[in-house]
Structure formats: C-alpha cells, structure tokens
Amino acid sequence: KPIEQLTSDEARTEVNQIKADIIKWGAEYYEQDQPSVEDFIYDQTYARLVALEAKFPELQSPDSPTQQVGGKPDSNLAKVEHEIPMLSMGDVFSVDELMEFNERVYKNTKDHLEFNLELKIDGLAVSMVYENGKFVQGSTRGNGTIGEDITKNLKMIKSVPQQLSEPLSIEVRGECYMPKEAFAKLNLQRETDGEAVFANPRNAAAGSLRQLDAQVTADRELSVFAYYVPEFEGVGVDTQSEMLARLKELGFSINENYRKVQTTDEIKAYIDYYTERRNQLEFGIDGIVEKVNDLHLQAELGNTVKVPRWEIAYKFPPEEEQTILEAIEWTV
Ligand code: NAD
C-alpha cells in the first residue's frame, strides 16, 4: 500500500514488522555470515522503513536499524573500541537519486565540487592501526563503536603491510575481500567436505577473517584495499584521490579503478562503464562510491549518527533484473 494511504496504526504495525525482519536479517548477515535473503530485498525493505519513519516521525526511535551500524561483535573475539566510529554509508538506486544527493551537497557547500569515484568492493570494512610505521592492531567495524580484534588474522594477509614505508602513527581503513576465483574454489571444497557454502564472496571474506584460529584465515585467499585515513592531517594530503596515491606509497594495496570527476556526464560514464564490466573484475562489487574529493570539505560536511554526508553509494540493480532489462532493451 502506498505510504500516503496508511493510517497511523497501519504504519506502526508495518514499522514493527519491518524492524523485526531487518534486525533478524542483520544478525544473519553481520554476525553469522549467512544471509537468508538477497541484498536487494534487504535494501528495498530498509528503504521502505526509512520512508515510513520520514512520513510518521512519531515512529522513529534510537533502537531502529536506521539509526544503528552493523551488528553485535562476536562474543568469542576480543573487543576493540573505535575512537572514531566506523560508519555505514547512505545509498541510492538510480542516477536521478544520485543527482539529488549531489544537489544537497552543493547547496550545503555552495562550492564548485569535485568528486572521487571508486568501486564499492563487496567485502567488509577493517581498521588497521600503525604505531611508528608498525602494524599493531586490526579490527572489524562491529557495531561502529565496538569492533572485533582481528590483529592476528590481518597479519596473515599479504596486502596488509606489517611495516609502512614511513614511521607514521595512523589508523588506516579499508575493505577486506575474497577474489571471485578463491570464493568459487572455497565453496567447491566446502561442498565436497559437506560444509555449508557461503552465499557470496562478502560473507566468505567475513567468515574467513572473523576466526579465533588465525590459521583458518591464513588458508583462505583474502586481500585488503585501503581507502581511508580518518585523521588525514597525519598523512599530509588534501584530497581523497591524493589519499589513495599516498596509501599506495606507504605500502598498501589500493583499488586503481578510481576517477576524479566534476560533471554529471563523467559520473554517468563511470557508472555505465562499470555496470557493464562488473562481471569481468576479479573481485565482487555491489556499486560505486562517490566521495567529495576535498578532505577539508568532508570534515565540514560531517556525519549523521549512521552515515557520512560527504559520500554515497550508488547500488547496482540485482543481476537478474539487469539481465531482464538488457533483454528487453535488446528485443525492442
Ligand atoms: P554498505 O556495505 O552498503 O556500505 C558501507 C561499507 O561500504 C563501508 O563500511 C565499507 O566497508 C564499504 N566499502 C566498499 N568499498 C568502499 C570504498 N571504495 N570506499 C568506502 N567504503 C567502501 O553498508 P552496511 O551498513 O555495511 O551494509 C548495508 C548493506 O549490506 C545493505 O545495503 C545490504 O546490501 C547488505 N546487507 C544485506 C543483508 C542481507 O540479509 N542480505 C543484511 C544486512 C546488510
């Protein structure tokens, strides 16, 4: 039923039902690494909750999944507190919605704006802390404030430098992922061994990294792309695109498919390019991330309780739907 036609009681019943579903799906996805529904079902249901809460503000509450990041940290793993919270990211599902986001940012900044476009790697966020250039602590995002200690697991991953090329004391964030080929091999092996297969490379990466026994992590093929230093002053750069180049210099692996853009046409071209080629990449992506390139402006724009105001994810349509759309375009 369209939201405008709902009575307040109907809206309350629906909000409660959706919250229960999203909390259950969130636990399966973030805590057990075994989702029972496709991401686009989750995304559509979540978007409905956001719209319901906007139309019926009396139904908003701090315990809503729209106000919280991720899931509960695994009780078997030690906890790490994030001094600077690790947030989620807002998302849009069409270029029009992306342009609306850009207009809001422009209005807020009144500047001529440059964005950095990156691939949205389908993995899980990790934090890597360095002291005088030495890797000392690794953690997952967890609920954004409390994450899981995965220091010994991250030490098993080749693309996580144990020593930086300069003696900096910084926190670096990135995305841990399992390449598609390694994912296919792992699932084949699990099937042969009679174990449950992972639903997608993201869940396989999360399940392989959040392990008490770091040897399990060592036996799986995982990689990390670094993309963020919350306290960017520490690395002496002013923009996100410079940040990526700097992280590479320091010894990290970065995803090279990023592009600095200024116009809507450039943004559309990037989206089209990777929508067509996403299947040819050796790692999974579920969209494009658009970031305000100026790091000082990012800091000025700040965050909501859940998401930064300076970045947004454009999510690809689910694969089947895309194939259907392509087939329709082809026949008409
Ligand atoms: P998100 O995964 O959509 O976006 C935020 C994350 O993007 C960051 O934390 C980071 O890990 C990642 N990221 C990847 N590439 C990046 C880059 N280049 N720059 C910056 N960040 C990058 O948000 P979320 O809150 O972690 O999860 C919500 C999403 O997870 C949903 O949209 C849904 O698709 C999926 N989900 C699915 C289920 C399910 O049951 N299927 C349940 C919960 C969540």
Image (cartoon, rainbow, N blue to C red):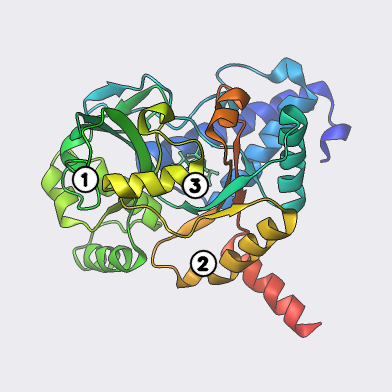
| Front residue (pair 96, 68) | 96
Q: Position of residue 210 (x, y in %)?
A: 26, 40
| Front residue (pair 112, 208) | 112
Secondary structure of residue under mark 3: helix
Q: Residue at x 69, y 78 (%)?
A: 327
Looking at the rendered structure, which numbered label has been put on residue 82? none
Mark earlier in primary sequence (1, 3): 1
Q: Is the residue marked by circle 3 packed among few (<14), some (14-19), or many (20+) residues within 10 Å?
A: many
- Horizontal side of residue 217 vs 175, given as left or right: left
Q: Which residue is mark 1?
A: 161
The quarter of the displayed image where residue 191 is located: bottom left
Mark earlier in primary sequence (2, 3): 3
Q: Which residue is mark 3?
A: 241
Q: Position of residue 27 (x, y in %)?
A: 42, 35
Mark 1 residue type:
Pro
Mark earlier in primary sequence (1, 2): 1
Q: Residue at x 71, y 71 (%)?
A: 325
- Horizontal side of residue 291 vs 58, given as left or right: left
Mark 3 residue type:
Ser
Q: Which residue is mark 2?
A: 278
Q: Is the residue marked 3 within 8 Å of ligand 1, measured from its CB?
A: no
Give the label, 1 or 3, closer to the camera: 3
Q: Residue at x 35, y 41 (%)?
A: 32
Q: Position of residue 332 (x, y in %)?
A: 81, 82
Mark 2 residue type:
Arg
Q: Which residue appears farthest toward the bottom when viewing the image?
A: 331
Give the label, 2 or 3, closer to the camera: 3
